[in-house]
Amino acid sequence: MTCDLLIRNIKGLVQVREKFAGPVCGSAMANLPILSDAYLTVSSGLISGYGPMHELSASIRPAATIDASGRFVFPSFVDSHTHLVFAASREEEFVMKLQGATYEEIAVRGGGILNSAKKLQQLSEDELFERSIGRAWEIIRSGTGAVEIKSGYGLTVQDELKMLRVARRIGLETPLTVKTTFLGAHAVPKETSKADYIDLVLNEMIPAVAAEKLAEYIDVFCEQGFFTPEETEQIVEQGKAYGMKPRIHANQLHRSGGVQVGVKTGALSVDHLENIGEEEIDLLRDTLVMPTALPGAAFFLGLPFPPARRMMEAGLPLAIASDYNPGSSPTGNMPLMIALACIKMKMTPEEAINAATLNTAYSLELDDTVGSVTLGKKANLFITKPMPSLAYLPYAYGSNLIESVVLNGNLI
Ligand code: NIG
Ligand code: FE
C-alpha cells in the first residue's frame, strides 16, 4: 500500500470525525474527539487513512514520513470572517483610541473605514495584491487553511471589484481555500448621500460583482451610524437576487437589529454579537444562522465579549473567526483567537477548537471538505511543537506552537 505522506506517532490527532457535516451545537461543543498515539496518511491531497499506531499496516510504503512524537495534529483552522485585503495599517488611530477616542468618533472624523478606502483607492490591483499577499502567508503559518475575505474598503464600483479580484487571486496563488464576500455597504463615502450610495450598491455594484462572479456572499455593516436593519435587508435581498448569500456584521457597537435582519433574511452567519441579549439568543434558536464571535475585535476595541456560555446553554452553535482588519483586529492569528475565547469568553479549549474548525467550515459551506480529520476531506493540517496537552495551546498563548503546516497534502 502506498501513500504520499505518513504522519506517525501522533500524540493526539484532534477533531477526528468519521462522517461530518453540520454544525456542532450547545453542549455537544464540549466534545472534541481526539485519537491518541495515532497515524494519518495522505494520498492525492486528501486524508486517506488514520487510526491508532498499533493498527498501522507494516506494508505501507509512504513517499514521505513525518514523526510527530509528542506533538498534536489538528485540522487547519477555518477563518470565516476577515478583511485581509487592505492597503495599509492604521496604528495612528490605535494611538488615538489609547488616548480615549472611540471607534465611532474616529469614524466620524473620517478615520476608520473611510481612511482605509482612501488609501486603497490609490493603489493598482497589482500593488494591492502585493500589500495583501504577505498577510495570507502569515495566516497560513499560524494554522489557517481556509478563509473568507471581504471587500468593503473600495466603496466605488471599480475599487470594490479590484478588492474582490485580489481576494480571488490570493486563492489562486496560495494553498488557501478562499471564499469571498461583497461588503460594499461597509460605510458611506463622505462625498455621497446615503441614499445615492445605497442606490449605487444596489444597481451598479451588486450586478457588476455578480457579472464577474467575484463573490459567493454579501455582507452589510448593520450598525448605528452605518446601515439600518431596513437598509441591510434591502441590500442583502438584492444580493440574494444576484446569487449571493448573506452574512452580516451584527450587534458590534449597539443592539442594532442586526441579528433580527440576519434571521429574517436567512443569513449564513451573524458576526460580532458583542451587544446581544436574550431576545437575540431566542431568535437564533432553531435557525441555521451561525452566531460568530470575533474575539480579536472585542479585545482590541475594549468591547464586551459575546455571552458565549449563555449562547451554548441555549443550545446554539458558536463559531470563532479573526476579523483580520486594520481598524479593529490587526491580526489573523487563530490560536490567539482561541486563547481569547477561552480567557475572555470562558469557553473550554475543546469548545473553542470546535468553534474555529467545524463551525466556521459549516458557515462557509465548506464542511464537506475541511474542518475535521475525516476520510476524503482535504489534507489541511498543522502539526504542533511538542505539547503536554491540548489545553497548552490556548494556555501558552504567547508562544508560537505551530511547527509545520500541510495544505492540500503538501508540506508548506
Ligand atoms: O468587522 N465593523 C466593521 N468592520 C470591521 C472593521 C473595519 C475597520 O475599522 O476597518 C470589523 O470590525
Ligand atoms: Fe468585520
Image (tube, rainbow, N blue to C red):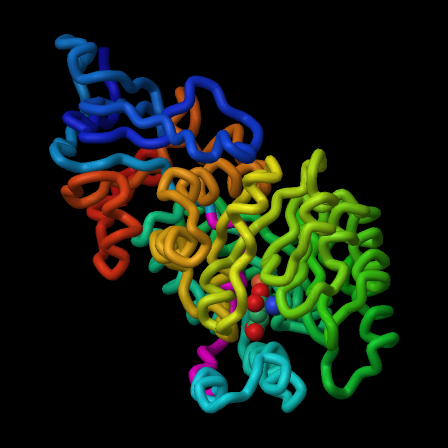
Q: Nearer the viewer, residue 290 or 204?
A: 290
Above/below status of 269 relative to 62: below
Image quarter where ligand 2 lies? bottom right
Residue at 32% from the left image edge and 23% from the top image edge: 43
Residue 184 seen by the camera: no
Q: Which quadrant does the N terminus fall into? A: top left
> In the rendered view, does 170 fall on the left or right side of 181?
left
Q: Nearer the viewer, residue 174 or 84?
A: 84
Residue 305 seen by the camera: yes
Q: Is residue 87 magenta?
A: yes
Residue at 72% from the left image edge and 53% from the top image edge: 259
Above/below status of 230 relative to 143: below
The rendered magenta stretch, by its main secondary structure, is classed as loop
> In the rendered view, does 89 fall on the left or right side of 266?
left
Residue at 53% from the left image edge and 69% from the top image edge: 303
Q: Position of residue 190 (x, y in %)?
A: 73, 86
Above/below status of 292 relative to 375: below
Region in magenta = 79-92
Q: Quadrant of residue 15?
A: top left
Q: Is residue 345 magenta?
A: no
Q: Position of residue 309 (x, y in %)?
A: 51, 46
State how many labels appear: 0
Q: Nearer the viewer, residue 126 or 145?
A: 145
Residue at 23% from the left image edge and 54% from the top image edge: 396
Q: Quadrant of residue 189?
A: bottom right
> In the rendered view, does 328 fall on the left or right side of 121?
left
Q: Position of residue 258 (x, y in %)?
A: 73, 58
Q: Position of residue 26 (x, y in %)?
A: 55, 35
> In the rendered view, does 211 fall on the left or right side of 94?
right
Q: Nearer the viewer, residue 405 or 358?
A: 358
